[in-house]
């Protein structure tokens, strides 16, 4: 089963720049994470952008939607900042007709993968599993759970994704 | 959705004993791993044994089967050494009637969680996701994939689980 | 041999706040680091402040100097942000008479200890060793080397401490 | 100041072989550890052997002694298994005349560096610092302390090196 992974940045891929002392993006850690997980799923990975999701514009979202529409794969995983993951999921759900037959799962992390004690590897394993078995639709996979795009919100006090 | 996790040991939970220089079991790392993954799935965890799966006896397997039969949960995850994971899956499939309605997913790790660069967290996220959505049956979740119990083998040369 | 450790913050102790996505200070990691290093040196540790050294004021430096003067120990280690470590060392050298007989070693880190791939543990092992054997004076221990306070500068392009 | 590092193996460099489930040696982690510590000391590193120190023979020790004698550097650091570190130190002290002017520091680790929570980086920073400043002689650097070769023993109950 072929799975397309689109990388958009988010906490997942943030790194510590030791010269400036600030958090920044360099390359994605997804290939390293898939290697660490000894992943044998057939995935093709493409980085669409490397940004904080609070800075994601409508044009960025339009690009993500367009890419999801164009690729031949019917199962897609998107790594994304958690702050506006729900907005991007909504944009995807609005643009993709159900008959497109695409299963899209967005996931992210609360702690950068590079920081050692990240939830990223757990979330990646989770999202990659949900995307293989769920019926067409747009979903968020966080905290070991999977939510339909219109039934979830991020609780900003706790950092946890909740049903709504 | 309530999920029962049974811990049986395996590489997942091996630790380095710094006084003897040998690998050994102490307590399970599952609660710490679920915390790290910020898991919000409703799980109850019980340690059935802490052993290397090469040392698992028929009596041990009978105990695992009996426990799976007795618990009220219909979705179960078992952490298990990779060497005989397929045997335990077969024992479960033989003993549990399909009408029991139980979805059981076995998972493990190639590198101990305590060793920093483990595939364990990825596998746990994966198994916990598959167990929530798959229909009744006995499965193995490894390498980001999920296999029905009677269609998989561990390739001992490569350490990878393969369809057969 | 009794050693006094003063914690002042710096990159050493920075953490990632997963709710805000910013770097921040909570408690010092020094006790955990000493445990990890199985340190058996007789140390007493006190946190004087938890700040970025770019925000260290003259009043903060006066406090550090005063504390170094007052404690009975003649061997002191100070954890400190790298950006103004040299300034604090100069303040200490100016205030403490050589006949005070105190050996003071400042050290820090380029990557937060909590981020997994830190130089902090190496620097701590290094500083704690230099402070046990060097004659009275004020020193900086970074990059495995030890510099007298007035013969070193931080190269901000490379993040490396150099003789000058 | 030029420092020679001789690698002999020991817990420092043990790795987990995921196919056999056993601990084994591959390459030394010293270069990676020096990189992580952003070490700027001028070191030349050579691997003499990669063995558990319980398996070190008299011929192995003779080789180490001979190498220490031959190299031009007067400051040497040896990574070594902790179980027979004292024996090798004694062999070095017996063979090297004090007038050779060599400062030799042996160090090791209780937990393999590859296992994430190792004392190795702390010990390396410590040993590398002691070797730069101590007068000629043979020493052991463990637990943040430095011992003359004939005044130390490993307490096998606690894993701690103690004065004697």
Image: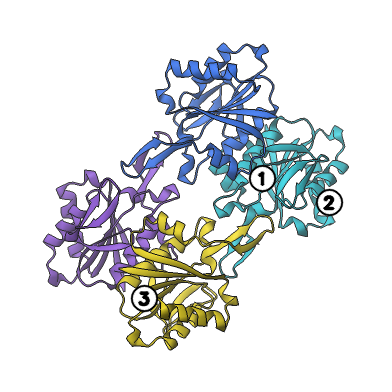
Chain colours: A cyan, B blue, C yellow, D purple
Reading the image, the residue beneath label 1 is A45
One can see residue C153 in this view: no
In the visual, does D25 lie left or right of B93?
A: left
Rate crowding at label 2 as few (under 14), some (14 to 19) or many (20 or more) other CA atoms within 10 Å.
some
> What residue lies at 38% left-to-right and 36% top-to-bottom?
B24
Chain bearing tag 2 is A
Q: Which of D66 and C114 is in front in this view?
A: C114
Q: Which of B87 and C76 is in front in this view?
A: C76
Residue A90 percent across, percent down from the top left: 84, 45
Residue C59 percent across, percent down from the top left: 56, 82
CA gap between label 3 and label 1 equals 60 Å
CA gap between label 2 and label 1 equals 19 Å
Reading the image, the residue beneath label 2 is A62
Chain bearing tag 3 is C
Rate crowding at label 3 as few (under 14), some (14 to 19) or many (20 or more) other CA atoms within 10 Å.
few
> What residue lies at 81% left-to-right and 32% top-to-bottom?
A101
Disc 2 is placed on an element classified as helix
> What residue lies at 23% left-to-right and 70% top-to-bottom?
D74
Q: How many labels does the image show?
A: 3
CA gap between label 2 and label 3 equals 66 Å
Quick check: C145 above or below A38?
A: below
Reading the image, the residue beneath label 3 is C72
Q: Which mark is residue C144?
A: none
The quarter in which the N terminus of chain B is drawn is: top right
Q: Are marks 2 and 3 on the same chain?
A: no
Quick check: D89 above or below C144?
A: above
Disc 1 is placed on an element classified as strand
Q: Does the CB distance between marks 3 and 1 fall below 8 Å?
A: no
């Amino acid at each position: 089963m072929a799975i397309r992974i689109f990388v958009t940045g988010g906490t997942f891929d943030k790194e510590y720049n030791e010269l400036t002392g600030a958090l920044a993006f360099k390359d994605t850690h997804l290939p390293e994470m898939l290697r660490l997980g000894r992943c044998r799923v057939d995935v093709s990975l493409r980085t669409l952008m490397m940004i904080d999701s609070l800075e994601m514009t409508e044009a960025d979202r339009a690009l993500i939607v367009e890419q999801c529409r164009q690729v031949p794969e019917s199962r897609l995983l998107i790594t994304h900042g958690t702050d506006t993951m729900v907005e991007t999921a909504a944009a995807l759900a609005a643009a993709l007709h159900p008959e497109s037959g695409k299963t899209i799962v967005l996931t992210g992390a609360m702690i950068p993968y590079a920081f050692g004690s990240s939830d990223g590897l757990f979330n990646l394993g989770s999202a990659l599993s949900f995307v293989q078995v769920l019926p067409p639709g747009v979903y968020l996979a966080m905290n070991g759970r999977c939510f339909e795009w219109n039934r979830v919100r991020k609780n900003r006090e706790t950092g946890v994704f909740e049903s709504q």
